[in-house]
Image (spheres, rainbow, N blue to C red):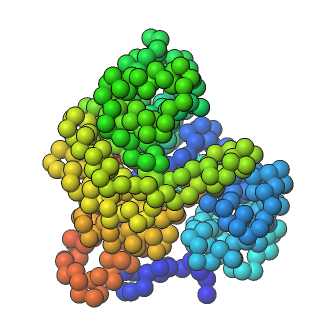
C-alpha cells in the first residue's frame, strides 16, 4: 500500500469529510526562514540535494544518528552521494516525522509514490533533477503550487530589505513576502556579540550609537523602517524568559560594562534584555504588530561541531528552563507599561504547552490576545501536535488558535500545513464520533477554516489578504 493516499492520517469517516473542507485552503506562512533573495532570483535548483538537504538540520541530525560521515551531510561530498546517503537512512526514520514529511514532499511536488524501503536512489535522483529543471519547480513556482498567500521571512534589524522591495514591485509575484523584525541577538547582548551589534547598528543609523539610550533609539528606528516595508510582526527567541527587574540606570550600567569589555553574568544579560525588550515592545504595540516569542532551546551544544559547521546545524536541545512565574512576570510587566501586543508564545519543550497557554490566558482581553503557538521544532510530530491540541483546548479556545507555521528554510516544506490539517481534522473528527461534540456542520467547518487560515488573517492584518 502506498504510504501517502487520500485518507492518510484520517481514521474516521467524519475526519475524511472534515479534511475535504480545509485541504484546499490557502496557506498563511507567518513564520519561516526562507531567503527573500532566493525567492526573488527564482533560479532553478541544479539538484534535489540543493533543495532538499541543504540547510535542513532536521535531516542532518537523523543522518548523524544513522552513522553517516559528516562529509555526506555538511561536507564536500558530491550531491548525488549526499542524496544516496540520505535515502539509505530514510526507511529507518519510520516513526520519526521525517518519514512522513519526505513522503509527502516527494508525492506533492514530484508526483513520486516511491516505496521508501525499495528505492533506486540513482534513478530517483535523476528523475527529481529532471523535474527541477522545469519552470514548474523554481522557488516562486513551488510557493504558488503550494497555494501560499503570505510568506513572512525572518530578518536582521539591520537588513536593508532590498529583496522584499523587489518582490513587492514584481507584478508576477502573486503572493506577499513580508519581512519580520528579528532583534533577539541585539536584545540579549553578551561580551562576544556586543561590539558586532553596535557596529552594525551604527552602519545603518543617522546618529551615533554610543550609549543605551541611543542604542534603543536606533533599534526603534529600524522597527519603523521595517513597518514602512510591510512588516507586521517581530520575532525573538531566547533560551530563558527575559527578566523585567532592571531600572533604566541599572540597565545603563550593564550596557556600560559590556561597552568597556567587562564580563557580564548571564543574569545581568537577561536583565538588560528585559529592559531593551520593554522599550521595543512599546513601539510594537503602537504599530499594532504581532509579537512572537520562541522560548527554551539550548543552542550550539557541541562546540567542536560549532567550530566546524557553524550555527543552526543540528546541535540544539530541548530546554527545560521556562518558568511560569517568570513568564507571567514578563507579560505582566509589558501589560503594566502599555507594551503588550497580540502575542504568540512557542515553547521548545512540549511539557510547557499547558503552562504557557494558562499564562497566556491571564493576559488576553479585548485589546490584545496572548496565545500558545503551534507545536514547534521538536514538537511538530504527529504525537506532538496531538498533545499540543489537547493542551491548547483544555485551558483555551481551540477555535481561536492561529494555526500552523512552516518554520523552514525549504521551499517544499509547505506539506507541513497539510500534515497539521490532517491531524487537526482527525482530532476533531474523533471527538465528534465519540459524541463529545454536537455542533452543526457549518459551525465545525467555520472553526476549522479559522484555525487553518482565517485566524492568521485577522491577527496579522496584512493588507489585501481576506478571510475565506
Position of the N terminus by quadrant: bottom right
Residue 341 higher or lower than 220, as above or below: below
Residue 253 location in percent, x, y?
41, 23
Q: Nearer the viewer, residue 320 or 459?
A: 320
Q: Is residue 232 above or below residue 294?
A: above
Residue 84 visible in the shown view: yes
Image x and y of residue 377, in percent: 51, 59
In the picture as drawn, the residue positioned furthest to the left comes out as: 366
Residue at x 64% of width, y 55% of height: 314
In the picture provided, is 220 more to the left or to the right than 128? left
How many numbered markers are drawn?
0
Q: Residue placed at 28% from the left, 69% from the top? A: 393
Q: Position of residue 7 (x, y in %)?
A: 47, 81
- Residue found at the very far top of the displayed protein: 207
Q: Position of residue 271 (x, y in %)?
A: 38, 36
Residue 381, relative to residue 251: is it above or below? below
Quarter holding residue 287: top left
Residue drawn where x is 73% and y is 49% of the image = 304
Amino acid at each position: 500500500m502506498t504510504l501517502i493516499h487520500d485518507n492518510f492520517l484520517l481514521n474516521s469517516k467524519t475526519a475524511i469529510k472534515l479534511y475535504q473542507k480545509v485541504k484546499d485552503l490557502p496557506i498563511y506562512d507567518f513564520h519561516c526562514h526562507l531567503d527573500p533573495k532566493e525567492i526573488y532570483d527564482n533560479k532553478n535548483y541544479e539538484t534535489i540535494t540543493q533543495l532538499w538537504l541543504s540547510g535542513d538540520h532536521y535531516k542532518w541530525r537523523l543522518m548523524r544518528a544513522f552513522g553517516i560521515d559528516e562529509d555526506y551531510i555538511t561536507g564536500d561530498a558530491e550531491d548525488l552521494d549526499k542524496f544516496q546517503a540520505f535515502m539509505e537512512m530514510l526507511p529507518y526514520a519510520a516513526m520519526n516525522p521525517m518519514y512522513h514529511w519526505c513522503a509527502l514532499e516527494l508525492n506533492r511536488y514530484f508526483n513520486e509514490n516511491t516505496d521508501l524501503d525499495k528505492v533506486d536512489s540513482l534513478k530517483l535522483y535523476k528523475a527529481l533533477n529532471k523535474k527541477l529543471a522545469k519552470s514548474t519547480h523554481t522557488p516562486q513556482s513551488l510557493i504558488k503550487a503550494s497555494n501560499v498567500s503570505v510568506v513572512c521571512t525572518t530578518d536582521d534589524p539591520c537588513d536593508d530589505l532590498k529583496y522584499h522591495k523587489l518582490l513587492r514591485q514584481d507584478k508576477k509575484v502573486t503572493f506577499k513576502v513580508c519581512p519580520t523584525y528579528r532583534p533577539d541577538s541585539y536584545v540579549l547582548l553578551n561580551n562576544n556579540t556586543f561590539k558586532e551589534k553596535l557596529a552594525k547598528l551604527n552602519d545603518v543609523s543617522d546618529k551615533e550609537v554610543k550609549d543605551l539610550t541611543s542604542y534603543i533609539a536606533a533599534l526603534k528606528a529600524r522597527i519603523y523602517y521595517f513597518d514602512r516595508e510591510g512588516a507586521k510582526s517581530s520575532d525573538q527567541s531566547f533560551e530563558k524568559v527575559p527578566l523585567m527587574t532592571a531600572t533604566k540606570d541599572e540597565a545603563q550600567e550593564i550596557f556600560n560594562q559590556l561597552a568597556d569589555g567587562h564580563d557580564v553574568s548571564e543574569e545581568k544579560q537577561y536583565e538588560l534584555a528585559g529592559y531593551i525588550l520593554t522599550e521595543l515592545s512599546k513601539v510594537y504595540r503602537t504599530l499594532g504588530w504581532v509579537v512572537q516569542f520562541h522560548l527554551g532551546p539550548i543552542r550550539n551544544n557541541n562546540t567542536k561541531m560549532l567550530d566546524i559547521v557553524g550555527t543552526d546545524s543540528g546541535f540544539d536541545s530541548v530546554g527545560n528552563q521556562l518558568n511560569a512565574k517568570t513568564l507571567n512576570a514578563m507579560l505582566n510587566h509589558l501589560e503594566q507599561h502599555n507594551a503588550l501586543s497580540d502575542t504568540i508564545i512557542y515553547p521548545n519543550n512540549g511539557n510547557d504547552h499547558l503552562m504557557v497557554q494558562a499564562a497566556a490566558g491571564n493576559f488576553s482581553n479585548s485589546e490584545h490576545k496572548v496565545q500558545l503557538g503551534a507545536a514547534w521544532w521538536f514538537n511538530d510530530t504527529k504525537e506532538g501536535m496531538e498533545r499540543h491540541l489537547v493542551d491548547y483546548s483544555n485551558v483555551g479556545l481551540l477555535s481561536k488558535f492561529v494555526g500552523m507555521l512552516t518554520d523552514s528554510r525549504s521551499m517544499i516544506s509547505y506539506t507541513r500545513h497539510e500534515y497539521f490539517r490532517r491531524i487537526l481534522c482527525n482530532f476533531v473528527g474523533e471527538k465528534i464520533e465519540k459524541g463529545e461534540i454536537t455542533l452543526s456542520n457549518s459551525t465545525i467547518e467555520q472553526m476549522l477554516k479559522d484555525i487553518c487560515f482565517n485566524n492568521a488573517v485577522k491577527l496579522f492584518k496584512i493588507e489585501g489578504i481576506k478571510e475565506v
